[in-house]
Amino acid sequence: MTPAGVYPASMNSTDELAQLHKRLRNIRESKGFTLNQVAAQSKGTISAIALGSYERGDRSISAQKLLQLAQIYQIPAFELFSQPQPLMEKGRVVIDYRKLRDDSDPSVEQLREIIASIAAVRRDWNGEVISLREGDIKSLQIFGSLSVSQINAMLNRYALTRSR
């Protein structure tokens, strides 16, 4: 995955359109909508047949239709062109909370708060180390608005052990 705004040399408009078509379907399905439900929500401006054609790439889609779909799906329009951020790989990690607690970097405060909340809910730590489970790491990514690279940097900085 390339950083936002950076395109690999091999990326061309055909590839980008193919990704857009796939993304249209993935977003619709992730919202739990059928083609007919989206057509109904569009109040007849997008038919189920047209939407299916957009998703397959059999038909060109206008910017107006893309904006309308973003509104129906209740997402920012740029999300139609973005690939979803991958979640962290499976496994668990033991974090040295002492290192985290003693770090004077202000950007670490949110991380300390999230990990302290996880520990408080689970009631299973001693204030020195905490074992973060796969779900905890995903929560860090989602609720901390952290990218995979940010989480990996954090894990490399504060982890005692990592297992998969």
Image (cartoon, helix red, strand yellow):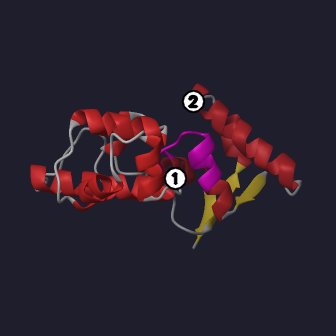
- Taking 60 as reference, is 65 left or right? right
164 drawn magenta: no
Residue 69 appears in which quarter of the rendering? top left
Indicate the amino acid at tag 1.
Answer: Lys
Q: Indicate left or right for 42 with 66 as reference.
A: right
Q: In the picture, which quadrant includes the N terminus?
A: bottom left
Which residue is the extreme one toward the top? 106
- Mark 1 closeness class: few <14, some 14–19, many ≥20 residues within 10 Å: few
Is 94 or 82 nearer to us in this picture?
82
Q: Position of residue 127 (x, y in %)?
A: 83, 48
Q: Residue furthest front?
A: 44
Depth check, front residue: 40 or 153: 40
- In depth, the one of 117 and 70 nearer the eye is 70
Q: Give the labeled residue for mark 2.
A: 107
Circle 1: element type = loop
Which is closer to the viewer, label 2 or label 1?
A: 1
Please indicate whether residue 86 sits to the left or right of residue 100 in the image.
Answer: left
Farthest residue toward the bottom?
164
Residue at image position (73%, 36%) is 113
Q: Whole-percent x and y of residue 154?
A: 55, 47
Residue at image coords 22%, 42% = 6
Determine crowd level at label 2: few under 14, some 14-19, many 20+ residues with C-alpha closer than 10 A: few
Residue at image mark 1: 31
- Estimate the spatial distance between the alpha carbons at disc 2 and disc 1, rounded to whole Å: 33 Å
Instruction: Please tell me which residue lies in front, 33 or 78.
Output: 33
Please give the name of the residue rendered at 45% of the width and 39% of the height, measured from the top-left corner. 72
Q: Residue at x 23, y 35 (%)?
A: 63
* Span of residues in magenta: 138-150
State whether residue 93 appears in this view. no
